[in-house]
Image (tube, coloured by chain):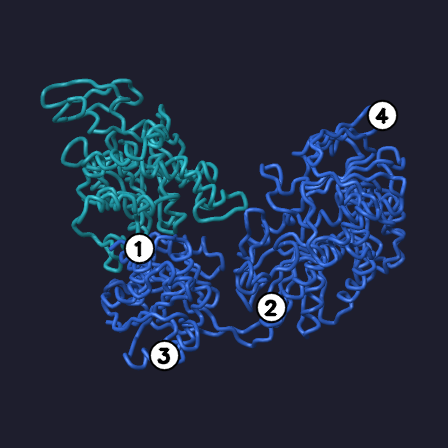
Chain colours: A cyan, B blue
Amino acid sequence: MQELITRAKALLESGEVQRVLGWKQGEHIYDPEPAFFDSAEALKDFVYNGFCGANLSKYMIEAAKLEGKTLVFLKPCDSYSFVQLMKEHRVDREKAHIIGVGCKGKLSVNKIDADGILDIQGAGYPDCADTLTVDTLYGQTTVSYKDAMLERCHVCKGKEHMVCDEQIGESADTADSDRFAQVAAIEAMSPEEKFAFFQSELSKCIRCNACRNVCPACSCRKCVFDSTKFDSTQKANTTSFEEKMFHIIRAFHVAGRCTDCGECSRVCPQGIPLHLFNRKFIKDINSLYGEYQAGVDAQAKAPLTSFTQEDAEPSIVAEGGLTHA
Amino acid sequence: MQKIGVFVCHCGSNIAATVDVKKVAKMALKEPGVCHAEDYPYMCSEAGQSRIAAAIAEKGLTGIVVCSCSPRMHEATFRKAAERCGLNPYMVEIANLREHCSWIHKDMEEATEKAVILMRAAVAKVHLNTPLQAGESAVTKRALVIGGGIAGIQTAIDIADAGYKVDIVEKTPSIGGRMSQLDKTFPTLDCSACILTPKMVEAAAHENITIHTYSEVEKVSGFVGNFTVDIRKKARMVDMTKCTGCGVCQEKCPSRKTANEFNRGLNTRSAIYTPFAQAIPNVPVIDTESCIKFKTGKCGVCAAVCQAGAIDYKQQDEIITETYGAIVVATGFDTIKLDKYGEYAYGQSKDVITSLELERIMNAAGPTKGHLERLSDGKAPKEIVFIQCVGSRCSDDRGKPYCSKICCMYTAKHAMLIRDKYPDVNVTVFYIDVRTPGKNFDEFYRRAVEDYGVNYVKGQVGKVAPQPDGSLLVQGVDLLDNKQILKKADMVVLATAIEPNPDARKIATMLTASIDTNNFLTEAHPKLRPVESPTAGVFLSGVCQGPKDIPETVAQAGAAAVKVIGLLAKDKLKTNPCTAQADELLCNGCSTCANVCPYGAITYEVRLVNDHGIREERRVASVNSALCQGCGACTVACPSGAMDLQGFSNRQIIAEVDAICR
């Protein structure tokens, strides 16, 4: 962390960047939040630890409108989102100085809580340790690091940054599960079971919009749910179906552009596994149009917005959908 | 609030027999804004249209819904009727009660309920309709014909005779196509070349026709009346302006081992070659993959012997860009590959051949100079077996589900010609059905059976087994006698299914013309618009649309030409006002719409935008409405809903859905 601050200070002082986009301590040890730092002095609040799961790419859309360059810290998985935003002309690569920061898996406070460890006061952040030491109001306790990791880290896309100007810190590939196992399990359900599953998960939604607000793909100037131009404007649900529609519409809107950064599920206060919708699309796109990972290459043609002779015919797409149904 | 009139058509009994039209009209009156509703036996008739006119005048209607047949049928009729009464034609909506309702349902109660819902959706849409004005675009008075076979040649000649310029783009070094490979043609048995070459010469000499051989269409943009096409003129390595066509280069070329495509690979050709003697243009090309000069750098014989100095090894492909008002696809066919039909031993024995190969063997300019002989040992065959429907009418994925249409007739022709010239040769034809509709066709087939003694056996062949003595053992079944047949043959000829030229798919994609599951181009209407593609300005000629023989191809070629002439005769075309528009306040500038636009109608520009008091420069989409065809791809791809299609706005579509779900 100190190395990041030192480098950030140097870049600020040399005038190469006008501001720093990083994380600062939140109310608790486990909720650091994204923050802009305008001066070397302000950097005293900067933190980078195992709880810094927040993906900063989306903030670079606003940064692109500001004068001068912004220094941004991106973890390997965040860099996919930045590349995807470059592809969509939303961020300005020229106005970004990107430091690729090391990441060895980020922590989920919900998972630690679920282990019965409450009122966390502090936590050790050892690199690649098997055990995480947690200080709580009630004393020190330990938890297996792997068990405390965010879901997305178990399907880590790898330790490589897709874009950066320099790198600080080591990364580890923490993948240890099949990315599409959960999707396949849902696909195997009967229509009734599926409906019941989504009914139970999505009925928890309180429409706080956290998933949308954090999502780097949900970066429309004016969200269709906020615009009076459409009949989908924010309003109280009249039926329990409408809350499902919000998530289904959102999944369609980000299909083919979602990098599977997992932020939607991380921020959901209700613990809804929202990433599963997006992953279903990713799985289908892979099987119908060949392997594609959004955010790898800003120049690559995206399968849903391009046509090739080898594309599956509509009838095959329909059949594919039916076999999954 | 709109004042809407609803007009329910009986379509004789087409709609009224299944839908309670009176009830639909009655229910219409309950819809908000509907101040007039009536039903009538034929709304499209003069009297029906007068009723619409009268209602518009009397009630001061601002929008109308016609509950009738598909908008593809009569939308234009009713729009014109409305326009004559001073109503903007885009204030007319059609509720399709025929194709979408009465024709596909049997139960009157259910069909009526659905009809009411369809009417309701149309009324909901009209409420949001706004008057639209069609623009105009100029017509480039020049046509492009893709493919230089008999279909393309005939279409080009007919268009050129009407006084319009035509370009033919042909992939191979010469025009002529499949017909130039045929020996005789059914049912008159006249020589194919004798009737084709005059047409080729006529096309080449025509002042209005430009022929680009050894060329391919590379890129197509634009729309009806204004297509811009990039044509790749492949390097011939021979200067067309200098070459005299003397042929010395081909005689002297030391590379002679390349399979001769024109003779279906039955013999070889030189590396510098013209496909056949009557080729047009009579200018050879160098096949650089076979040419020793290109492979090793050491040769140059052709350049040395060429008196005209026409050989140019440095020639490069050239891309020319032309504009056209209309495009005709005439890409023709090829025979299917037989690698999935191991049972016929094609590829195992040289004496199992396709009918098109037999065509070359029987042709005086072919590999055997017209002598019927076995390709394995050059001996004269005494027993020939023809197998019909090889890959045609096939229920599994090895072949094609359709009938190739020409095989019954050409097999009868082959059998007859062989029996005529070599009476000592026995000819047996295994068939599933013999299909000979066509003028003088059945008579022709019967002549083969009755006068020439061709042995027709109804039944299929299970296996062709090459024997150690060089003969072929044909295992078949005679369904009429219900017995197995084992027959020794010297030669087996396979009536191989035809399929669209593999390039048809690529070309259809470039033209945004639709194709069916067999890669045949789709016509705009199977009965009423058989030579037009659904894509405006694109027409179909020949087998690219479906299996055809020569007379049908020529007839269709003429029909396609007439449609082209009808289009080119116009000075201006009305453009479709239902085009996309981007809302600059909602646009993210993400380029998704530009990526999906098939017409290249969307560009991006950085513009000063005033977003509720915030003035900033934004990258926003801009639609060229002259290029936009209103397909709507951008409106669904746009993540922020900034793209909207006039006449089919997101709001209108949602209003229709809401009305249906009400």
Which callout, 4 or 2, points to the residue nearer the camera? 4
Residue B469 badge: 4
- Do residues under tags 1 and 3 come within 8 Å of each other at their CB atoms? no
Q: Earlier in the sequence, mark 4 or mark 3?
A: 3
Amino acid beneath label 4: Asp
Q: Could you say where residue B579 lies in the image, as x and y percent from the top left?
A: 41, 65
Secondary element under disc 4, as helix, strand or loop, is: loop
Looking at the rendering, which quadrant does residue B429 occupy?
top right
Amino acid beneath label 3: Ala
- Is residue B585 shown to the viewer in this render? no
Judged from this view, the residue extending furthest toward the front is B481
Q: Could you say where residue B643 lies in the image, as x and y percent from the top left?
A: 36, 59
CA neighbours of label 3 inside 10 A, class few (<14), some (14 to 19), many (20+): some
Residue at image coords 56%, 72%: B139
Chain letter belonging to callout 3: B
Q: Are marks 3 and 2 on the same chain?
A: yes
